[in-house]
Image (cartoon, helix red, strand yellow):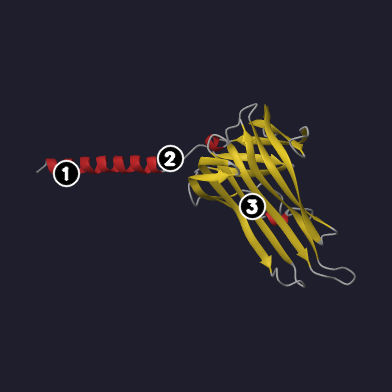
Amino acid sequence: MKNVPLLISGAILIFSFNACKKTNEDFQTASISEYAPFTVGKYITYQLDSLVYVNFGASSVVRSYEVKYMVDAEITDNLNRPAYRIIRYIRKSPATTFTPDATYEAVNTTGSLEFKDNNERYIKLKLPIRNGYSWKGNTYIDTYSLNSEVRYLDDWDYIYDSVGLPATIGTFNLENTITVNQRDEVIGSPDDINAYNEFNKGVEKYAKDIGLVYRLFFHSEYQPPTPGRGGYYQGYGITLTMIDHN
């Protein structure tokens, strides 16, 4: 009988060890580099559809281009961290020549992917990569000062969806992708032409061993009529759809 407590204790220890082991295994997820594999020389080419408002905000047009994002070099960012410089090349059609028009920075911190665009630092991906996990992707962006021009980016929750599922992007059938839903918001009453309204939408898709394969971003504000001026829209939208990669 004296051995019974020892046997029970041993069983508890074994059960606890196995439970902890299983829990740790359950929490293992993909790494950031699986969905953001930056190496010098890597590129992804996209169809870029850019929505802009014209005629003093009375109407909108969509202008299409091809853009190539190429990893140009390994660098050190302003926080002295290893980073990658990415150069964007643009052309109107395949018959024209690509020319550089923008530069970006990407930092894989192991726990997250930071991407600097127009001096704004976004947290694009974050561990753990699992359905429903969320984080504040725009936390480093000034959305609160009086001079901020991007207040609409405040307090966005980035949320993983469809992790590891296949997706069709353009002509590509991709076996393993993740979706990051960033915002889907309507403020005001869009059907009321005499009232302010605002739309904000952001979503990105990443494919394993490739990187960003799709991006949709849209922001618009409708200003109602005032004496001497009719109602008008301001804002912009872009859609990136992968058409080539190496």
How many residues crowd around disc 1 within 10 Å: few (fewer than 14), some, or many (20 or more)? few
What amino acid is at disc 1? Pro
What amino acid is at disc 3? Gly
Could you tell me how far apart the alpha carbons at marks 1 and 2 are, in whole angstroms? Answer: 35 Å
What amino acid is at disc 2? Gln
Asked if the residue at tag 3 contacts the one at tag 1, i.e. Cβ–Cβ closer than 8 Å, the answer is no
Could you tell me how far apart the alpha carbons at marks 3 and 2 are, in whole angstroms? Answer: 27 Å
Point 63% across, 29% down: residue: 42
Identify the residue position indicated by label 2 in the image: 28
Against 243, residue 219 (above or below) is below
Q: State left or right for residue 179 relative to residue 231.
A: left
Identify the residue position indicated by label 1 in the image: 5
Point 24% across, 44% down: residue: 12
Identify the residue position indicated by label 3 in the image: 202
User: Horizontal and vertical percent for residue 157?
Assistant: 59, 53
Could you tell me how far apart the alpha carbons at marks 1 and 3 are, in whole angstroms? Answer: 58 Å
Q: Is residue 76 visible?
A: no
Q: Could you tell me which quadrant the N terminus lies in?
A: top left
Point 62% across, 58% down: residue: 184
Residue sitting nearer the eye, 4 or 241: 241
Residue sitting nearer the eye, 145 or 117: 117
Q: Could you tell me which quadrant the C terminus lies in?
A: top right
Q: Residue furthest right?
A: 228
Residue sitting nearer the eye, 61 or 212: 61
Q: State left or right for residue 85 relative to residue 54.
A: left
Q: Nearer the viewer, mark 3 or mark 2?
A: 3
Look at the numbered disc 1 and give the secondary structure of its residue. helix
Against 244, residue 218 (above or below) is below
Q: State left or right for residue 35 relative to residue 28.
A: right
Name the N-terminal-most of marks 3 and 2.
2
Dividing the picture into quarters, in which one does residue 171 lie? top right
How many residues crowd around disc 3 within 10 Å: few (fewer than 14), some, or many (20 or more)? many
